[in-house]
Image (cartoon, rainbow, N blue to C red):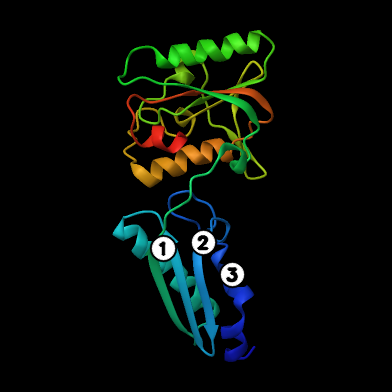
Amino acid sequence: MSLRRLSMDQSGVESLLSKISDPETGRPLTQTGQVLKIDCSGSNIQIVIGLCSHSAPLWAQTRGRIAEALATQYPTASIQVEIEKFERPPSKLGEIGLEAKSVIAVGSGKGGVGKSTIAACIALGLKRAGCHVGLMDADVYGPSVPHLLGLSGRPAVEEGKIVPMLHGTMPVMSMGFLVPPGEAVVWRGPMLHGAITQMLRDTKWGPLDYLIIDMPPGTGDIALTLS
């Protein structure tokens, strides 16, 4: 294949970028609207990628991964990869594929007041009343729902979706299932947004009458994400 044909093959470049994941959400950049520009002209390839993170190392790492992938496929092309700040538009629940008629978030300005217990009791009460209920533990810093319900283990993944743990027939999802016990979570801002959105969007909740969300203490990043 000639150099000119390689450099002009925009679909080939898009295919390569589909294998590069956003460092925050883990989703392919081509699926999140973060590929801002692909310009293939002659022997030149210019790519502009948007990242939500302010982290310079993540910018450099992503730029390097893209440049390496392109250089492997197009070894004689002139490659330019630019990273720009990207503002991810907020997603509505319906837009992220969540089939819940109602969402109830249980929160408080301080910790240790029984939010998780109340959230679990609401979920179990609604389930006993015959409703289809899901319970999501959004307290990534101190997930306690797994302990309250006696659940442990790691969720399976089917067809790109996380299969939630089950308490009886009630689906339950928590960061406690994904992070090793005792390991601290120090995420902030966009990384938290990505984790919470992923638990909502990429969990196989199924049709629900209610999704009960156990919030972390305060009104910080997670509360803003869910709002």
Alpha-carbon distance for marks 3 and 1?
Answer: 15 Å
Instruction: Using the image, tell me which numbered label, if any, was put on residue 14.
Output: 3
- Identify the residue at horizontal 47%, vertical 37% (top origin): 196
Asked if the residues shown at circle 1 and circle 2 are in contact, with their CB atoms under 8 angstroms apart, the answer is yes
- Identify the residue at horizontal 53%, vertical 12% (top origin): 122
Alpha-carbon distance for marks 2 and 3?
Answer: 10 Å
Closer to us: mark 2 or mark 3?
A: 3
Which quarter of the figure has residue 185?
top left
Counting labels gives 3
Which quarter of the figure has residue 220?
top left
- Identify the residue at horizontal 48%, vertical 45% (top origin): 90
Under circle 3, the secondary element is helix
92 sits left or right of 186 in the view: right
Residue bearing the label numbered 2: 20
Alpha-carbon distance for marks 1 and 2?
Answer: 8 Å
Residue 164, given in percent of the width and then of the height, sits at 59, 29
Give the residue type that dot 2 points to.
Ile
Instruction: Using the image, tell me which numbered label, if any, was put on residue 149.
Output: none
Asked if the residues shown at circle 3 and circle 1 are in contact, with their CB atoms under 8 angstroms apart, the answer is no
Under circle 2, the secondary element is loop
Give the residue type that dot 1 points to.
Thr
Under circle 1, the secondary element is helix
Instruction: Using the image, tell me which numbered label, if any, was put on residue 62.
Output: 1
The N terminus lies in quadrant: bottom right
Q: Is residue 175 above or below residue 214?
A: below
Which quarter of the figure has residue 106?
top left
